[in-house]
Structures are given as structure tokens and as C-alpha cells.
Image (cartoon, coloured by chain):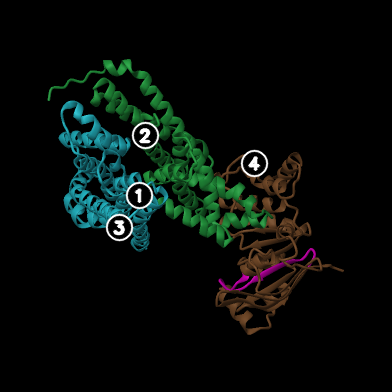
Chain colours: A green, B cyan, C brown
Amino acid sequence: MNYTLQFRDIWRNFDFFVEGFFHTLWISIVAMLIAVIIGTMIAVARNSKVKTLRLLSSVYVEAIRNTPLLIQIYLLYFGLGEVGIQIPALACGLISLSLNTAAYTAEILRAGFESVSKGIREASASLGMTLWQTYKVAIFPLGFRAVLPSLCNMTIQCLLASSLLSTLGINELTNQATRIASKTFRSFESYIIIALFYILITLGITSTFNLITKRMKGSLH
Amino acid sequence: MYRFNIYDLSFILRGFLITIGVCLGTMVISSPVAILIGLIRALKSKNLILKGLQSILTLYIKAVRGTPLMLILMFLFFGLPFVGVNLSPISSGIIGLSVYCVAYLAEIVRTGVESVAKTQWEGAAALGFTYLQTMRAIILPQAIKIMLPPSASFFIGLIKDSSLCSVIGFVELARAGRIIVEKTHQAFFVFGLVALLYFVICYPLSMMTQKMEKTLNA
Amino acid sequence: MLAEILKLVNVNKSFGDLQVLKNLNLSVNQGEVVSIIGPSGAGKSTILRCINYLEPINSGEIYFENQSFNPLKSNIYRYRENFGFVFQSFNLFPHLSVVENVTLAPQMVAKIDKKVAQETAEQLLDSVGLIDKKNSYPKELSGGQQQRVAIARALAMKPKVMLLDEITSALDPEITGEVLKVVSDLAKQGKTMILVTHEIGFAKQMSDRVLFFEGGCIVEDGTPQEIFNNPRSDRTKKFLANILH
């Protein structure tokens, strides 16, 4: 095998990399944000006094967590196509990724919320606060702080999962790797650079969470 | 219009069995390597060669865990041919899954060993155990208990992640579903069936894992 | 003539199969300081927690200011505002500063203006001796300091009755003094208070009435003089003999 690493062709096609980096970054961030919002609602529903809410949220979480993301994407994209609804691939991919991440995030948040001690909840109740007020002042702030490391991991998982959107033809990083490799015939270099991009974003996510943790945990332990 | 029939069902079920087989096989192949790497990384020694080895292994693990499985599979199947290495879909799939598996399992092994309470080391040292004796008799047995639930969870994740092999043409459950859908155009039904089959493996396993965690943590 | 502010009539409370309150009857007048003593785990705390409906009761009536409280009809949150509950484990909000802990409920629940709430909070923190710690966080304070903040927090809602649940039990013995001083100041101000306590000396000194509670019932109810010096029931005598050694 005669192969020497040459990065010159890669440099010439750098705009491909930038395009991929951009797509991966914004898709992951948006999906994670949506996942946190939906995940919070599901986590609250799981502990609700209303039996239907508990049941529905449990079914949702278990269904998503026990089936592959790829199948969920296929179901949404091809399934809707079958019924005649044409959703653009990007929207489809983003929705699937968000809903998938939301199920896992819901479990993380649920554990966080449950870790808020009974004493704190009773203190809120004794002061006359409603359940929603207790959520707002105690359970959410303390619950989120408690699971920041897990949320960091989840964000990284979401980043890695965004690579599945390449199957819908979206030009995120993984797709670009193959495209650039085909174009420049420099496959090792392409894939290595793309891998480095992912690792770079991972480092960015970890640093961001460390910063958030420092700011929030300042007042706790 | 082509109707879904018994042959299609058997094709899908075949994919189902292949998925389970491949995942079990991958776990079996990867475990010894992962245990070795995990233990090497968990060792505390001033030996420079060992430290060098640990650094290389750490690099490997961090690299694999920081990149998507999809990228690894794409590289093996689409990327390698550019340098003259042509792997079949099955080979790419198994190699890719194994590389992935080893990295994650090795990390589970390492954190398992490291999370055995420091007090255990101190107690053993007080009794006169050497480093290796402590490892063998006291740390590892406890570490194995700690490692089981995350390993089981990982296996469940592996079953789901194996669906990515479909993208490189490996005919496991997800690919089988895709092929049948292209034939019958009954996406909801077929992918729904495929999802159900994944669910049927993963859900009971995750319930068992939760129970395992409860009993081991008691 | 003292007005009756709180009355419990035939209250029953069970946790599963375990009946903790058996046909409990209790009456408290405005301005009274009532101490409840008795063996641990008997359910003394449950009495307090049923009064502000932290725990629902199985049967019986609770009258507050001569009005029966019905959880189905009345707003349970408005009802709770009448009571200031202080917990054994303080339960301060760890992510909020001391002054934020005290101003939170008045602003959020009683919808009091931010500036007014702030002023009230500072007055209260001053009265418990912690005004200089107003911007500190709970983790930076000692147990006794946290408990005093908890008392200020409860007082900020201007409750009509204070419910104090073994508030010194989690404190080191040397620190209980600073908390007990705050409570005795409140008593002198005429605050209606019901305390569950193990501090016999304090109960003797500060209470208008002492209740001995055991086995789900109030065994004896009298002035500190009567209970400690001339207990009538044998069970009271036994309890006192055990603890006064």
C-alpha cells in the first residue's frame, strides 16, 4: 500500500468542512435545546398525579429508548411519505433527533428532579407555594444543577447521533467526509479531519458545561 | 401493488437473528480485549513503557468515543477502498462495531476498577497484600459487580447501534426492513414491525438491567 | 379573654396500617405557647404536619379562627399561609442567598412588592441577629444560623401561628441556645406557637401549656407546673422519669 498523507487537497476544499461543521453544530444545539424543553415536560408528566399523563409519558420514553434512532428517522421520513405528507429531509431529521434525545433527557431530568429532597419540597409547600411554584423555585433549579454532568454527556451523544442525518442526505460532517473523500481521493485525510472536528465540538461542549457548572455550583457545594 | 407476504416476514426475521448474532459475537470478541485495555489503563505504575502504552490506549479510546459510529463505518466501507483495502459490508460492520465496542467496554472496565472504594485498597495494604494480590482478590471481584449493569446497558445500546450497519449495506434487521419497504412501499407497517422487533429485545433487557442494578446496589 | 385560634376535633391519621393520631382533640388560644413532648416516633411531628395540611387527615375536623378547613372547598395554599413551619432539618433553599430565601415566598405567594419584601426580610434577619449574613449562602452558615434564617423565612409570611418541629434536635448542643433565644423572643411578643420539642428546660420555661403525647393520644394537658411537678398519669411519670436522668 503506497500512501502518503497529503493535506493540500483537503485545504482546497475547506468550505466543505465548514459547511459540514456548521450544519452539525446548529443541528445538535437546536436538537438538544428542544430535547431539554420537551424532556422537562415529560419528566414532570412522569411524576404527575394524572394517571393518563404518567402512562403516556412512560410509553413515549420506553418506545424511543428501546428502538434505534435510525428506525425512528425512517419511520418519520418514509412513513409520512407513504401517507402523502412530504416533510423536507432536514426538518424530518431534526424532529427525529430532537424527539429521540428528549426521551433520554427526560429520564436524566426525572432523576434530577427526584433528587431534590422532600424537606425542600415541604418547605415550599409550608410557605404556601403551589406545586408549579415549587417546581419553579426549587425542583427545576436544584434538579438541573444535580444532573449537569449527565446533561453534558447527553449533549455529546446528541452530537454523535446527528451523524445519522447523513442518511437523509443532509450535509453535516459525516456526509461531507464521504463527499470530500470521493472528490479528492484522499480518504484517510478526510475522515481524520472530520473526526477532529467532532472531537473539537465535543471539547467545546465539555468546556461550556464546565463553565455553567462553575457558575451554578458556586452557590451550592 | 406488491403485498407484504410470508417471505418478506422471514427475510425480516432473518435480519433480526443476524442483528442479535452479530451483537453477541461482537461483545464476545471485544470483551477480552476491552478487559485487557481497561486493566492496563487502570494500573498505577511509574514504569515509563507502561505509561506510554496507557497514553496510546487513552488516545484510541478518546478518539473512538468522540467520533460517531457512523463515521467509523463509513470510513471502513467507503474510505478504505481509496487506499486499496476493500472490505465487504459484513466485515466493515463487524470491524467497526468491534472497534466501537472495545473502546466503550474498556472505559467501563477502567471506571469499574477505579470506583472500588479507596478504603478497600487501604484495608488490603494494612493487611500486607501486594498490589497484584489486592487487585485479584479484593478489587476485581467488586469491580465486576460494578461493571455488569453498564455493560448490559451498553449491549442494549449496541443492538440499536447495529442498525447503522444498514447504511453500508450489511443486511441486518434495519437493512432488511429498508429492502422490504422498497419492495412493498408499506413503510409504516414494515418499519413499525422492525421497531417492534428491536423493542422486543431491548425492553426486557433494560428491565432486567434495572433490576440487576437494584440488587447489586442494595 | 383569649380567642381560640386553632381547634382539632377527633382527628385521625394513619400511615397505611399504622394509626398515628387517634381521635385527637386539641385547642389552642391566640398568643399561647404550647409545647408537645413525648417519646420519639410517637407522631408528635405528625400533629403539626396535619395542622398545616402538609399531611392530609383521615377523619376529623380542623378549625382555624373558628372556620372549618375543608381541603376540597378551601384553597389549601391560602390556608397554609396562616402557619409558619420550621423544620428540624432547616430546609433552606441552597441555591438562594439568605435574604433571597426570606423574600421568596412573600413575593411569589403573597405577591408583596419587592422593596417591601426586602425591607421586611432585613428587619427579620436583624431581629434574629443575622443581618450581616444576608448575602451569604446557606452552605456558608452553621446549623444554628441556618435555623434562625429558617425562622425568619417563616415569619416573613406574617403567619398567625408558628409550628416548630423539633427545631433544635439537629443542632449541636452548644448552638441550641441561640435558636431558643429567638423562639423565646417570639413568645414574649405574643406569637401563637406550637412546638414539638425535646428541650424540657425550654418547655418548662417558655410554655403556657405542655402536652404529653404518646400512643396516638394526648395523655396529659396542663401548665408546665402541673405536668413537670405534678403529673397525674403514670405514663407521663414514666416518660419524665426516663428523660430527667
Q: Which circle, 1 or 2, is nearer the viewer?
A: 1
Q: Is A72 one of the magenta-colored residues?
A: no
Screen quadrant of the N terminus of chain C: bottom right
- Which residue is painted at 60% across and 50% down in the image? A135
Q: Position of residue C128 (x, y in %)?
A: 68, 49
Between marks 1 and 2, how big is the CA–CA gap? Answer: 29 Å
Assess disc 3: are there few (<14), some (14-19) or many (≥20) residues with their C-alpha within 10 Å of its C-alpha: few
Assess disc 2: are there few (<14), some (14-19) or many (≥20) residues with their C-alpha within 10 Å of its C-alpha: many
**Element type where label 1 sits in the image:** loop
Name the amino acid type tagged 2: Ser
Tags 2 and 4 both on a single chain: no
Chain under label 3? B
**Element type where label 2 sits in the image:** helix
Between marks 3 and 2, how big is the CA–CA gap? Answer: 32 Å
> Decide: marks 3, 2 in contact (CB < 8 A)?
no
Between marks 3 and 1, how big is the CA–CA gap? Answer: 12 Å
* Magenta range: C29-44
Chain under label 2? A
> Can you identify the residue that label 2 sits on?
A166
